[in-house]
Amino acid sequence: MKKSAVFFLSLLSTFMFSQKVWTLEECVNYAVENNLQVIQNSYNKKLQVNSLQIAKRQYLPSVTGTINNNANFGQGTDIFGNTNRNDNFNNNSRVGTDILLFNNGNLEKSIRKTEFDVEASGFDVEQIKNDISLQIAQQYLSILLNREITKISESALDNADKLYKRAKITTEVGTTPQTILAEAEAALAREKQNVKTAQINTERSLFALAMLLQLPEYKTFDIQNIDVQSEIEAPLFSADQIIDKAFENQPQIKSAENRVKSAEAQTEITKTAFWPSVSTFVGMGTSYFNSLVTNTVGRDINGNPIKESGFFKQYKDNFGQQLGLSANIPIFNKGITKLNVQQSKINEDIAKNVLLQQKQQVLQNVQKAQFDAESNYESYLAASQSEKSSKLALDFAEKSYNAGKTTIYDLNTARNNYANAQGSVEQSKFNYIFSLKLLNFYAGIPLSL
């Protein structure tokens, strides 16, 4: 019974997932949370955060403890030339701490540099999320476009089917020649092919979006249909209005800005090598010695042997403390520090040039989005006018055909022209919508449909 319940719940969850219809927001949210490239760069950010923690802990003193045990065996000669056994055991232990007192702010500058690296890596993650979000939005719109084209093709197929049925009847009763039926049949076959092509293109675009989402099962993947407005308006923003916001908000620019600051901080860190560093040492320790041959440490004034003390007594008697101060003063290192500073300044110039490149790229992206929005809007207006003219021409062709004044070839040509005009309207409309969404995205407006 229990196994049956588990199987039923598993089957139910699989069915529910297969019936899920994804919205654009759900696609974007899923991608930015599960995309492997996003996850990879999130790991890079975690590494930078960990490096920051390491840099901050450099302020803390280091404490070390050591225990040494040595045993010596064999013969040795003393200063009088006498040969004796020299078997002994030594033990000593020590605890000490090193405290950095001065290094011209090297630790503080290292922390500041690492903070800039953390910020830059965070913006790198945001940039990847933005790129994926835009790809998903474009592919989402591609699916909606192919579905609209499928509807247009299905409508044309329905009309072709009606015309074929009519031509079949009129041909059978002898009012129209056989060529009329042949042309109607050929037109029906063409429209069936167009419908199948549109359906395949829709499935292909669904598959492409599923691959972007990196879904393990793509055959049951589906998205929510959205009624895109039939009448669209001209762009609200121009490139000049957007560019300043884009420079402020785009993560690739913020990342490049932080890497410039990081390079400048690295130069300051490198310069600290010109200055001395001062540190202090505080420690304490004790020792134990045992002669494995005589078990004595010498003789008293009366000539009697003095026994070695026990382990704990020696540890108590030999306990001592140490305090030290040291300064590491650079004098000459072959001019390497100076060269390192020069190299660090070159890295600054490289980082600044990358920032200029990123700004140039964002500027071009905004200008291209503005150009695409304006040109696609003009294409939409032209396609809409062409659609109206094609619809009017189709109406005249249908009336003329019904009146017997035009041939079926003329009617099919008019219908093909109208279907192509409808497809051009939808194509230009969806191209415009994407370019408009992209333009608004650079203006700081989140993606939505």
Image: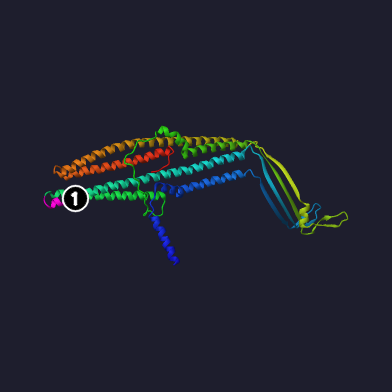
305 magenta-colored: no
Q: Position of residue 408 (x, y in %)?
A: 17, 45
Quick check: 431 left or right of 50? left
x and y, in percent, of residue 224 in the image = 36, 49
Quadrant location of residue 54? top right
Q: Nearer the viewer, residue 339 or 137?
A: 137
Residue under the image location 74 percent in, 47 percent down? 321
Residue 172 drawn in magenta: yes
**For the residue carrying disc 1, how many other residues have a C-alpha within 10 Å: few (<14), some (14-19), or many (20+)?**
many
- Say which quadrant the C terminus sits in: top left
The residue carrying mark 1 is 164
Q: Residue furthest top?
A: 240
Task: Please tell me whether the stretch drawn in magenta is mainly helix, strand or loop.
Answer: helix
**Is residue 190 something that shows in the picture?**
no
Q: From this viewpoint, which residue is outermost toward the bottom?
A: 1
Instruction: Judge by depth and name the residue closer to the eye, 176 or 179.
Output: 176
Please indicate, yes or no, whether residue 396 appears anywhere in the rendered image. yes
Please give the name of the residue rendered at 40% of the width and 60% of the height, measured from the top-left corner: 11
In the displayed structure image, the side of residue 43 where residue 434 appears, left or right: left
Three-letter amino acid code of the residue under disc 1: Tyr
Quadrant housing the N terminus:
bottom left
Find the magenta span and give its range.
168-174
Q: Residue at the location (68% across, 46% down)?
A: 97
Secondary structure found at label 1: helix
Q: Residue at x 49, y 46 (%)?
A: 41
Of the pair 365 and 289, the residue shown nearer to us: 365
Q: Does 347 sit above or below residue 24?
A: above
Q: In the orientation shown, which residue stands out farthest toward the right? A: 302
Rendered location of residue 20, percent (x, y):
39, 53
Query: On the image, which quarter does residue 71 sit in?
Result: bottom right
